Image: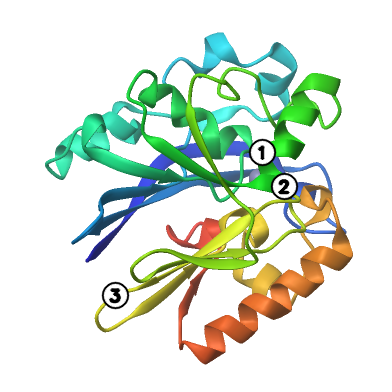
Amino acid sequence: MKLYILDFGRIIAPKAWIYTLEGLEKISGAMMGHLIVHPKDGLILYETGIPPNYEDLWPKVVLETFPIGEYKKENRLDVILSKIGYKLSDVSAIILGHAHLDHAGGLEFFRGLDVPIYIHKRELEYAFCSVATKEDFGAYLPHYLDFSFNWKVIDDDEIELFDNVFLYHTPGHTPGLMSMRVELKEKNFLMTSDHASTRDNFEKEVPIGFGMRDFEDWRKSTRKLKYIAKKYKANVIPFQSHLGLI
Ligand SMILES: [Zn+2]
């Protein structure tokens, strides 16, 4: 089994979205994904980044609040896959850690392919509800919350979805966020999605500012992830930490 870290470009956000007590000064954050090449279950993608035509799909207010700092040809999912010898139709499963626009927007690449999209039940409910009521507007967008996709719902606290690929319900940033642990032969990795953007969010439990939806849930989820990391000696990968940006 192999694990790739995918670089989907940069999104600009106020610092206060990552750290409590910070201001509206802008910070450049990574958009990332992970690709598991699974010996039995094929290509498994954890999160999808954004679509190439995001400027056509995102409302003006979203483009202004969260401008895309960098999205080059080499940040496109199809280009990344071709560089490592695969194409979009080779992807056999997609897991959404959560469904915010910069994590799930890349589902556009998979229109018509009928690939199963695994998401926590609470996340799918919350995302559809946010779009329908226009509450939490902008964090979720209607273009990818589409009934034509092959949605598969997970309603477990934890599950081994594929051999050596574990998902953990870790709410706080969103109600249905799922962190993922991957057991490779010699190493264990624990991906937190936006639960923790930085090492300080995780290790020092510095709250995630405006990115927080439920502080009590977030604190419990952080303790749960710490327990899992210790038990399995996992390398924890906060969302922004891959590229050494923060
Ligand atoms: Zn998010």
Q: Amino acid at mark 3?
A: Leu
User: Are there few (<14), some (14-19), or many (20+) residues within 10 Å of tag 3?
Assistant: some
Question: Which residue occupies 73% across, 37% down?
Answer: 125
| Callout 1–callout 3 Cβ contact below 8 Å | no
Cα distance in 3D space between marks 2 and 1: 6 Å
Cα distance in 3D space between marks 1 and 3: 29 Å
In terms of image quarters, where does ligand 1 lie? top right
Q: Is residue 61 above or below residue 216?
A: above
Q: Amino acid at mark 2?
A: Arg
Question: Which residue occupies 86% across, 28% down?
Answer: 135
Question: Which residue occupies 76% across, 43% down?
Answer: 25
Quadrant location, the C terminus: bottom right
Mark carried by residue 124: 1
Q: Position of residue 84 (x, y in %)?
A: 15, 45
Q: Is residue 164 above or below residue 118?
A: below
Observer able to see residue 12: yes
Where is mark 2, residue-wise?
122
Q: Is residue 146 above or below residue 117?
A: above
Q: Position of residue 1 (x, y in %)?
A: 22, 66
Instruction: Indicate yes or no: mark 2 CB to ligand 1 under 8 Å.
Output: no
Q: Nearer the viewer, residue 160 or 28?
A: 160
Q: Nearer the viewer, residue 130 or 7?
A: 130
Mark carried by residue 144: none
User: Are there few (<14), some (14-19), or many (20+) residues within 10 Å of tag 1?
Assistant: many
Where is mark 3, residue-wise?
184
Instruction: Please tell me whether mark 2 sits on a helix, a strand or a loop.
Output: helix
Question: Which residue occupies 52% across, 18% down?
Answer: 54
Instruction: Please tell me whether mark 3 sits on a helix, a strand or a loop.
Output: loop
Q: Amino acid at mark 1?
A: Leu
Rendered image quadrant of residue 178:
bottom right
Left or right: 86 as drawn, with respect to 77: left
